């Protein structure tokens, strides 16, 4: 399917996986609004996106604040002229043992990764429902399929995102909104390198561009086709 001229919002689009997806969509002629907390990253990325000849804008907010999410998304929709695609990507990956991680950090991971996805989806839903078309890509993780040591908050948040996303799909399909739950394995980014999960070696480990191509291709499927769930792994890390 040709997705040129559609309007996408990518949360956490100023760096990492979100930035790579924003660029891949802009290469297809999609107008892209990006969000995050770091304004400098957002401004620089918008400049790169505009160089590709598409409309682009940014909004600064933290995804764990519902009113700010609603306001920021509404501003982006108005600047782009609509929203047909949401990439629910913003997230944090604090690692630490159950014993050592403070309950404040634990709560922050859940607030950001789970509530952030919920708030952003609720903010775009009225526009998609009214138009009778939409695509929402919720970025979970293989960590959400199975818990593991030193990742209790992160894995629990992503397990909840998988479940939330499946409920969203069940409720919103009838409005021609495709809800796509993705569970990527380790991809080189600030998050995975800081957590010590990979050294980021491009010869061995998935790169943000690989993830972005995958998302782009899923979105280009004919609208009668919905990739409901998917995982991506490095071939031989
Ligand atoms: N990399 C991996 O191995 C991997 C594997 C599976 C799933 N994932 C998931 O992929 C997504 C992107 O991760 P990444 O690897 O690209 O991580 P990253 O490089 O650390 O980037 C995280 C992004 O999320 C944004 N963000 C974080 N907290 C935010 C908040 N409270 N409000 C608004 N934006 C916030 C950041 O923007 P600002 O800095 O501007 O706030 C940044 O753009 C996450 O959901 C992550 O869990 C990653």
Image (tube, rainbow, N blue to C red):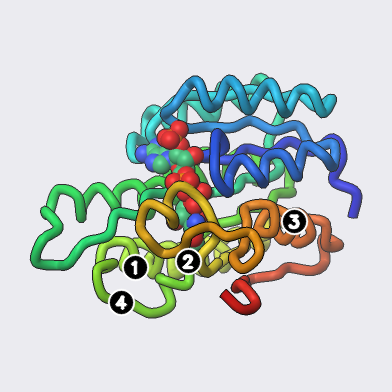
Label 3, label 4: how many angstroms apart (C-alpha)? 28 Å
Residue 213 — which label? 3
Q: CA distance from mark 2 to mark 4?
A: 12 Å
Q: Residue at x 75, y 61 (%)?
A: 218
Percent across and percent down for residue 147 are 32, 77
Q: Are marks 2 and 1 in contact (CB under 8 Å)?
A: yes
Specify the label residue 141 is tagged with.
2
Q: Is residue 200 visible?
A: yes
Query: Would you say the beta carbon of the disc 2 residue lies within 8 angstroms of ligand 1?
Result: yes
**Real-space CA distance between mark 4 and mark 1, rounded to the nearest whole angstrom:** 7 Å
The answer to whether residue 127 is above or below residue 89 is: above
- Give yes or no for contact between labels 4 and 1 (Cβ–Cβ under 8 Å): yes
Q: Is residue 212 above or below residue 122?
A: below
Q: How many marks?
A: 4
Q: Work out whether 57 lies above or below 104.
A: above
In the picture, the quarter occupied by the N terminus is bottom right
Cα distance, mark 2 to mark 1? 8 Å
Q: Earlier in the sequence, mark 4 or mark 1?
A: 4
Label 2 SS: loop
Residue at mark 1: 155
Q: Earlier in the sequence, mark 2 or mark 1?
A: 2
């Amino acid at each position: 399917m040709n997705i040129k001229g559609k309007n996408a919002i990518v949360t956490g689009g100023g760096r990492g996986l979100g930035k790579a997806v924003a660029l891949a969509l802009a290469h297809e002629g999609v107008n892209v609004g990006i969000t995050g907390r770091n304004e400098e990253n957002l401004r620089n990325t918008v400049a790169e996106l505009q160089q590709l000849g598409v409309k682009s804008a940014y909004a600064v907010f933290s995804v764990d604040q519902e009113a700010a999410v609603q306001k920021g998304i509404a501003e982006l929709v108005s600047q782009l002229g609509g929203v047909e695609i949401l990439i629910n990507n913003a997230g944090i990956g604090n690692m630490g043992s159950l014993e050592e991680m403070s309950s404040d950090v634990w709560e922050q991971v859940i607030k950001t990764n789970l509530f952030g996805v919920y708030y952003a989806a609720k903010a775009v839903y009225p526009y998609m429902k009214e138009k009778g078309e939409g695509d929402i890509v919720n970025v979970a993780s293989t960590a959400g399929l199975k818990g593991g040591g030193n990742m209790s908050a992160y894995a629990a948040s992503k397990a909840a995102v998988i479940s939330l996303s499946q409920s969203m799909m069940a409720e919103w399909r009838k409005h021609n909104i495709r809800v796509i739950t993705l569970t990527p394995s380790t991809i080189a980014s600030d998050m995975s390198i800081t957590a010590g999960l990979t050294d980021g070696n491009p010869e061995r480990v998935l790169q943000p561009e690989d993830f972005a191509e995958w998302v782009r291709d899923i979105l280009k499927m004919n609208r009668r086709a919905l990739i409901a769930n998917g995982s991506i792994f490095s071939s031989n890390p």
